Amino acid sequence: MVSEQFLKELPKCEHHLHLEGTLEPDLLFPLAARNNIKLPDNFPQSVEELNKKYAQFRDLQDFLDYYYIGTNVLITEQDFFDLAWAYFTKVSKQGLVHAEVFYDPQSHTSRGISLETVTNGFKRACDEAYKQYGITSKLIMCLLRHLEPRECLATIEEAEPYIKNGVISGLGLDSAERPFPPNLFVECYEKAASLNPDLRLTAHAGEEGPAQYVTDSLDLLNVTRVDHGINSANDDELLKRLAQENIMLTVCPLSNVKLQVVKAVSELPLQKFLDNNIPFSINSDDPSYFGGYILDNYIQVAKDFPHWNYNVWGMIAKNAINGSWCDDKRKSELLTKVDEVVTKFL
Ligand SMILES: Nc1ncnc2[nH]cnc12
Ligand SMILES: [Zn+2]
């Protein structure tokens, strides 16, 4: 296995990180107190109890139930800034160089918090992360697929100024996958794309849902990237297409284990993706809930795929950079850094 120090120094990109999923219990309770939010009686009432619950979830929905309760403690622009800032500070020590991060405005607008409050708080943290840590970033607004598509359309309309001025760089689709297929959101994706031709499109698909949802996300939503996508491995035609069209899958190893999508990271079809030239990146999804940030995910994959050498890891890091939505200058800077680190450890 490659060394942990190498994985730490390797320039890493995160493409699948829900900012609300970085809410650690030791921030959740102080924010609840700061904002006078009473958590439900059946919600764990201490950091220790909450950490115990986070040790295992039955499935995606079991996790989402906790996740949405957690978001209720976020009220002011400063709360959103503090949340994202805590995340950037942590990963700045793990070799993260570029982050394309999700957020769920509807979890907040449904509680009377404006999309501006949320977006401005997160954007300020992104700007500060660049200033203080040199981390570049992009904001991706996600639609909650358990909500009515017409509500999602209204959210896109609310976000129009941020989509037009590029503060929101991408559109995503998250929450409970299985009963809410991609075809429900065709109009939303078309509307968002019409507001700015540079808006990037992605969607969660093939996490708990079938490979068909990945195909439909490509065909119906015109996504150029797929979040999770691991069930693509069950469809050989789709695998060929992902390679031909250079569609990156944003894989989340520790998440998949915690949500019981797989029993162990070693079961993930990562070798199959490599063998079929399908680019993937390694990501943390909701790190405070799933027991690890970006470097923890890299280390676990390295442990479960111990035959991958420095060159293989260099290629994985480069695929993540090439699949990023940053400009060519930033990409070439980061690609050069990968070569330097690989050479140092070879
Ligand atoms: N892993 C995940 N899948 C779907 N929706 C999510 N929201 C936060 N994390 C998610
Ligand atoms: Zn996710």
Image (tube, rainbow, N blue to C red):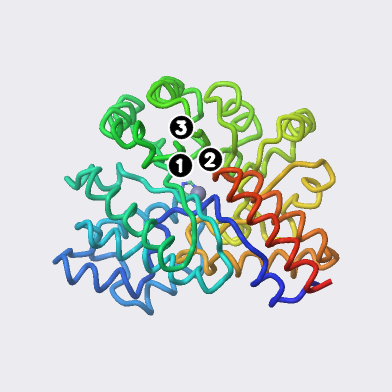
User: Looking at the picture, which amino acid does disc 1 mark?
Assistant: Asp
Label 3 within 8 A of ligand 2 by Cβ: no
> In the picture provided, is 91 more to the left or to the right than 244?
left
- Determine which residue is flagged by label 2: 204
Q: Earlier in the sequence, mark 2 or mark 3?
A: 3
- Determine which residue is flagged by label 1: 174
> In the picture provided, is 291 more to the left or to the right than 168?
right
Residue 24, above or below 69: below
The quarter of the rendered structure image containing the N terminus is bottom right
Assess disc 1: are there few (<14), some (14-19) or many (≥20) residues with their C-alpha within 10 Å of its C-alpha. Answer: many
- Say which element carries label 3: loop
Mark 2 or mark 3, which is nearer to you? Answer: 3
CA separation in Å, label 1 and label 3 = 17 Å
The quarter of the rendered structure image containing the C terminus is bottom right
> In the picture provided, is 309 more to the left or to the right than 127?
right
Residue 76, above or below 54: above
User: Looking at the picture, which amino acid does disc 3 mark?
Assistant: Leu
Q: Earlier in the sequence, mark 2 or mark 1?
A: 1
Marks 1 and 3 in Cβ contact (< 8 Å): no
User: Looking at the picture, which amino acid does disc 2 mark?
Assistant: His
